[in-house]
Image (cartoon, rainbow, N blue to C red):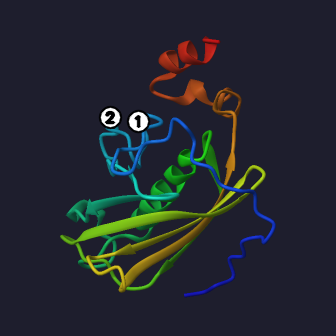
Amino acid sequence: MKRDFVVPTDLDPLQRHPKAAAPGEPIRMHNPLCFGCGAESTQGLHLEVRAADGFAVETSMLVEPRFEGGPGVIHGGILSTAMDEVMGTVPLLIGPSAVTVHLEVDFVAPVPIGSTLYLRADILGRQRRKVYVEAVGHLGDPSQPVVVGHSIFVTIDARQHFAEHVENSAMADEYKQRMSRP
């Protein structure tokens, strides 16, 4: 695994957001059509990410035959999507929505079709709007990772960030109505 990902030393103190999910509770879904977590995404992963202790989240997923890449193993793009989803959820424990600005995924070992993949993401630190995150995936033994990821997320004002793209959503009318509320 490469270790070029650098977390700054002058980090802001972390504080769990008062409205954050408690350990064991699901993290709220941000978009019903999200490919990673959306319940209404017909082809999506349907990940249910749950808050863990501290500044961490966890999920698991059955590696379904439809996720096949190489013979008998998960496609790297699907695995990267699952990593992005779990890492993108953990910033919600400390504040507002955030979007991915950097994502790196190290594929440590093949992930077989039919297995259950366990993912955990931890906040490594925050510096102003940047949130540094690490995620590890395993097949039942946390000491034997099959995938490791690092990412940087930037907190956003979701209404402003998505305003010019909401027209492209299958839920455009609903989102426009939500965005017009004070």
In the picture, the quarter occupied by the C terminus is: top right
- Residue type at mark 2: give it: Glu
Q: Position of residue 137 (x, y in %)?
A: 39, 73
- Mark 1–mark 2 distance (CA, rounded to whole Å): 5 Å
Quarter of the figure that contains the N terminus:
bottom right
Element type where label 2 sits in the image: loop
Of residues 20 and 103, the one nearer the viewer is 20
**Horizontally, is 37 left or right of 5 in the view?**
left
User: Which image quadrant is residue 5 in?
Assistant: bottom right
- Of 27 and 11, nearer the camera is 11
- The crowd level at tag 1 (other Cα within 10 Å; few <14, some 14-19, many 20+) is some
- Answer whether labels 1 and 2 touch (C-beta < 8 Å): yes
Q: Is residue 126 shown left or right of residue 134?
A: right
Please provide percent x and percent y for residue 93.
53, 47
Q: Is residue 171 above or below residue 70?
A: above
Query: What label sits on residue 33 in the rendered view?
Result: 1
Amino acid type shown at disc 1: Leu
Q: Position of residue 149 (x, y in %)?
A: 53, 72
Q: Which of the numbered marks, if any, corresponds to residue 40?
A: 2
Element assignment for label 1: loop
Q: Is residue 102 above or below residue 173?
A: below
x and y percent of residue 86 in the render?
Answer: 45, 57
Q: Residue at x 30, y 61 (%)?
A: 60
Who comes first in sequence, dot 1 or dot 2? 1
Q: At 49% across and 41% down in the image, what residue appears?
A: 20
Q: Could you say which disc has been placed on residue 160 in the image?
A: none
Question: Residue at horizontal 72%, vertical 76%?
Answer: 6
